[in-house]
Structures are given as C-alpha cells and as structure tokens.
Image (spheres, grey):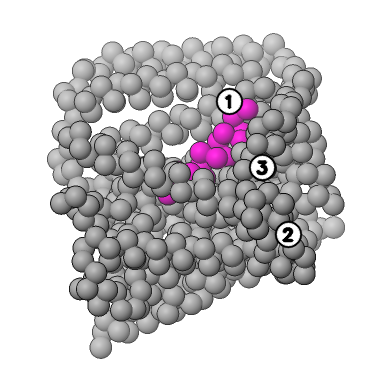
C-alpha cells in the first residue's frame, strides 16, 4: 500500500463524512421548511436569509445545554448508545459508489471508498447493527418508557429486515453480483433496475422507512405513549447525536435506494456528456445527478412524514409479516421464473 | 502483517469471551458476546472468507444477538431475581466442570503446534465460489439443513399456537 493511495482514500473519506454531516444538518432545516409548506406556514426564517443559519443555531444550542447523566443509569452504556448510533449511521457510506472514476491532476480516482465484492450485504449488515445504538441507549437510561421504546425499535427492525433482505434477493437474481459498483455500471444510461423490479423497490422503500424509524413507522418515539421514546433521558449533544443519526440514516438509505434501483450516477444521455465534457467534468456531473436523486428521496421521506399518520403497533407487525414478506417472496419467485424463461428461449 | 493482526484479534476474542463469563450483569455479558462475534468476523476476513464474514455479521451480530438482548431486557434479570441454587446442583456443576477440564487438557496434550495456515484455494470464500460449492457437491446437505430450519420454525409456531386451541 503506497502513501498516495492512503492519502487519496483518506481525503475521500473525509469529504464524504463532511458531506454526510452537512446534509444531515440541512435536512433538519429542510424538514422544518417542508413541514411548514405542507401545513401552510412559513417555517424558520429568523437566523440569516430564509433562516438558512438555523441548523447552526440549533447545533450551538445542543452544545450549550446542560449535560445530564441520570444517577441510576449505567453510565458507560448511556454514553456509548448515541455514539454507536452515529457510528453505525456513518459507516454505511463506505461502499456506495458516488461517481464513475474521475480524472484529477492526471490521475484517475475512483469515487468509492471501497469496492468490496459483498457490498450489498455490507450495507445490510450496517443496517442491522444500527438498532444497537437505540437498544443500548434505551436500556441504559433505566427508564421504563425508554426501555419499551428500545424493545419496539428492536422488534420493528428485525421484522422489516427480513422483508428488506428478500426484496434485495430478487434484485440480486437479476444483477448476478453483490458489488455495488458493478450494480451501478449495469444500469448504464436509463437501464435502471426500478423498471425491472418495481415491486421490489416499493418493498425496499417501505422497509427503509421502518429501518430508519421514520414516520409512519416512528413508533419507538411515539410521544403520546412513550413520552420521548428511547431518548427521553438524553439531553444536550447526546440527544443531538440520536437526532443526527436519524438524518444520516435517511441520507444513507436514500443513497442506497438511488444506487440499487435508480441507476446511481447514471442518467439518460450520459454518453453524449462524457464525450463532450471530458473525463473530469462528466463524472462530477454524474455525481451531481446522484445527489439530485438522493435529495429527492430525502424530500420524499419528509413528504411522507407530514402526510401519513403513525401506524398502530399491531398494524405495523401485520404489514411487515403478513403483507411485505409474502409479497417479497412472490417477487422472488416471479423474478426467478422470468429469468429462467428468458434464459431458455 | 496478517499474522500480527491475527494475534491481536485472537487476543481480543479471548478477552471478550472471558468477559462474557465474568460480567455480573447479563446485559453486559451479551454485549461482550457481540464484541466476540465481531472479532470472529475479522477472523473470517483475514481468512479471505468475505461472504462468511458478512453473514456472521448480519445473522449473529445483527439478528440473533438483538433477540438475545431483547429477551434479556424483557426479563430484566438482576441479583434479587436470581434463584438460589441448592448444594446438590453446585456439586453436580463442579463435577461436570471438572470432567470438561480433564477432557480439554487431554485433547490439548494431543495437539501439536500447527504449521502456518496456507489456504489451498484462497478464492473459496468468495460468494461465487461458495455458491458453486454449496449448490454443486453439497446440494443435499444444504437442502437438508434448510429443511431442518423449516421444521424448527413450524415447531415454534405450533408451540405458540397450542395454548390458543386449548383455551
């Protein structure tokens, strides 16, 4: 491993990390603006022009608040909870291809931190790990509402992970690879997977709402039943970490959806752009397109949150086990049969 | 490089597994067990068995351990609720533990220091090759084990449904 390689990857990791944090920050602002628009209000408009400094003010507020660790909590786990939540949210970005290789200063640099050949499974593993932050934090608070919320989060995540995994299997039957880079390359131009796997995409979308604990699946923080949910006892930046982790999760799952089903950095007419804009600007334009898709999905998350009311717990479980899982299995069978027929004739 | 990483991770595995036993709080035990499984994942990566590594990560760390934690949190075990054990059980425990120790020492004596591990086929752990092995020469055992899992699942459903019928 030469030093240049390490420096290159280090810069890439730092840039992606910075972008994730900034997007998570401005997602809080966007969420308020979207909510305001849907409810016919103005939203935050005091800090700076159009209120764009609001996230900074919020962040400062979080840092300045008093840090309280309940005396009856298990201290180390109480601190580890939010840290784990944020860590699990951030490491998912490592395998996502952010763009096709770009030529910078005479060197071709791949815009992906690591192209492991089990990339899809890695994402899946990170998602399944994400629940520990909530569970440990909820248990360590030593508060019955936090504990109930943590248990809800765990059972919800496990239930929806199954349907999510099954929906991915149908996709993998088509792509024949687990590497996210190859999956994106296969979707060149407008051959996006969503045209071939519409049902799989809808299942994946619903499951990612459940995995990120977003409305209408935000039962772990259902304030009418559980006060504040798993972070009832948290204050200051530790609470901020939990809220932040949710927005980073949203960003990562938007990026995964864009990559798996909506062609990643591919767009119609990309060959023409590649031929005319050269090897530096064309890939960067592709990256911009990818971020456009990601922003659309983040907006979609918010749109749904302010439109649909929260599920009841039994409705959530029925939808997961009796609705999505049989649908996902049917999707696998149909995909398998169609592929077999196409290969025969 | 790889050998040093192995020794480091192996030490961590042993420390974490010991902590599983020595931790007073059952929740802490489970958390140490999760860390132990994480070090196993690293071992698989070192052996170039990426698929196994990631499956270990998803299934053991991500699913089974979450269920363990889930059940323990619901039970809320602590020192007061732990039943006091009768002397007979303690004696039985000592005898069983002693037998296990004798067996372990006996088997350790028979081992010799292994030669450095050289993988005959370094690519075996990759998804494609593993799939070809599983669905080729090992098709029957693979399908039989999935049947076993199905039987366990049906059994679990049956156990939970039986009360409803009787009531």
The answer to whether any part of residue B74 appears in the image is no
**What is the distance, in whole Å, between disc 2 and disc 3 at their CAs?**
15 Å
Residue A91 inside the magenta-drawn segment: yes
- Please state the chain letter of the residue tagged with numbered disc 1 in the rendered image: B
Q: Is residue A88 left or right of residue A12?
A: right
Query: How would you rate the neighbour count of disc 1 (Cα within 10 Å): few for under 14, some for 14-19, many for 20 or more?
Result: many
Q: Is residue B46 left or right of residue A108?
A: right
Residue ID for mark 3: A57
**Residue A320 percent across, percent down from the top left:** 63, 63
Residue ID for mark 1: B29
The answer to whether any part of residue A284 appears in the image is yes
Query: How would you rate the neighbour count of disc 2 (Cα within 10 Å): few for under 14, some for 14-19, many for 20 or more?
Result: some
Q: Picture quarter containing residue A316?
A: bottom right
Give A35 or A105, whichever is nearer the viewer: A105
Q: Nearer the viewer, mark 1 or mark 2?
A: 2
Residue B166 inside the magenta-drawn segment: no
Q: Which segment did they paint magenta?
A: A79-93
Quarter placement of the C terminus of chain B: bottom right
Q: Picture quarter containing residue A259?
A: bottom left
If you read the primary sequence from the N terminus, does the residue marked by circle 2 or circle 3 appear first? 2
Indicate the secondary structure of the residue bearing disc 2.
loop
- Please state the chain letter of the residue tagged with numbered disc 2 in the rendered image: A
**Residue A294 percent across, percent down from the top left:** 48, 63
Quarter placement of the N terminus of chain B: top left
């Amino acid at each position: 491993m030469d030093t240049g390689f390490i420096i290159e990857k280090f810069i890439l990791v730092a840039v992606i990390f910075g972008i994730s944090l900034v997007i998570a920050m401005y997602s809080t602002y966007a969420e308020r603006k979207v909510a305001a628009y849907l409810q016919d209000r103005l939203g935050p408009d005091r800090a700076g022009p159009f209120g764009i400094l609001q996230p900074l003010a919020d962040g400062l507020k979080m840092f300045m608040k008093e840090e309280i660790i309940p005396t009856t909590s298990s201290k180390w786990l109480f601190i580890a909870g939010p840290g784990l939540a944020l860590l699990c949210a951030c490491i998912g970005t490592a395998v996502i291809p952010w763009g096709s290789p770009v030529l910078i200063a005479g060197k071709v640099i791949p815009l992906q931190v690591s192209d492991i050949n089990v990339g899809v499974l890695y994402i899946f593993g990170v998602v399944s790990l994400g629940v520990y932050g909530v569970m440990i934090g909820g248990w360590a608070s030593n508060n019955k509402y936090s504990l109930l919320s943590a248990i809800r989060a765990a059972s919800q995540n496990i239930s929806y992970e199954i349907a999510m995994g099954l929906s991915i299997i149908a996709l993998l039957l088509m792509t024949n690879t687990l590497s996210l880079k190859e999956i994106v390359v296969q979707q060149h131009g407008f051959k996006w997977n969503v045209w071939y796997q519409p049902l799989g995409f809808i299942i994946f979308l619903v499951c990612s709402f459940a995995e990120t604990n977003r409305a209408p699946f935000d039962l772990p923080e259902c304030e009418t039943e559980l006060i504040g949910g798993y972070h009832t006892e948290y204050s200051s930046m530790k609470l901020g970490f939990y809220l932040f982790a949710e927005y980073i999760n949203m960003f990562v799952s938007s990026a995964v959806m864009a990559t798996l089903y909506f062609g990643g950095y591919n767009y119609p007419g990309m060959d023409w752009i590649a031929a005319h804009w050269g090897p530096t600007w064309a890939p960067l334009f592709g990256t911009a397109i990818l971020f456009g898709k990601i922003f659309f999905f983040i907006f979609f998350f918010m749109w749904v949150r302010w439109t649909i009311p929260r599920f009841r717990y039994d409705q959530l479980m029925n939808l997961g086990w009796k609705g999505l899982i049989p649908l996902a299995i049917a999707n696998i069978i149909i995909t398998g049969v169609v592929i077999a027929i196409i290969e025969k004739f | 490089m790889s050998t040093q990483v192995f020794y480091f991770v192996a030490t961590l595995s042993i420390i974490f597994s010991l902590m599983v036993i020595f931790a007073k709080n059952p929740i802490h035990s489970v958390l140490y067990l999760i860390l132990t499984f994480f070090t196993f994942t690293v071992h698989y990566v070192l052996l170039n068995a990426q698929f196994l590594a990631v499956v270990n990560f998803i299934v053991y760390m991500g699913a089974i351990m979450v269920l363990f934690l889930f059940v323990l949190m619901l039970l809320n075990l602590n020192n007061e609720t732990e039943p006091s054990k009768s002397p007979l059980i303690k004696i039985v425990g000592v005898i069983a533990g002693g037998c296990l120790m004798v067996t372990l020492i006996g088997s350790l004596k028979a081992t010799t220091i292994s030669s450095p591990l050289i993988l005959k086929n370094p690519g075996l752990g990759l998804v494609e090759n593993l799939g070809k092995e599983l669905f080729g020469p090992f098709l029957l055992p693979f399908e039989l084990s999935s049947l076993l899992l199905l039987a366990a699942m049906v059994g679990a459903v049956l156990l939970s449904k039986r009360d409803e019928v009787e009531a």
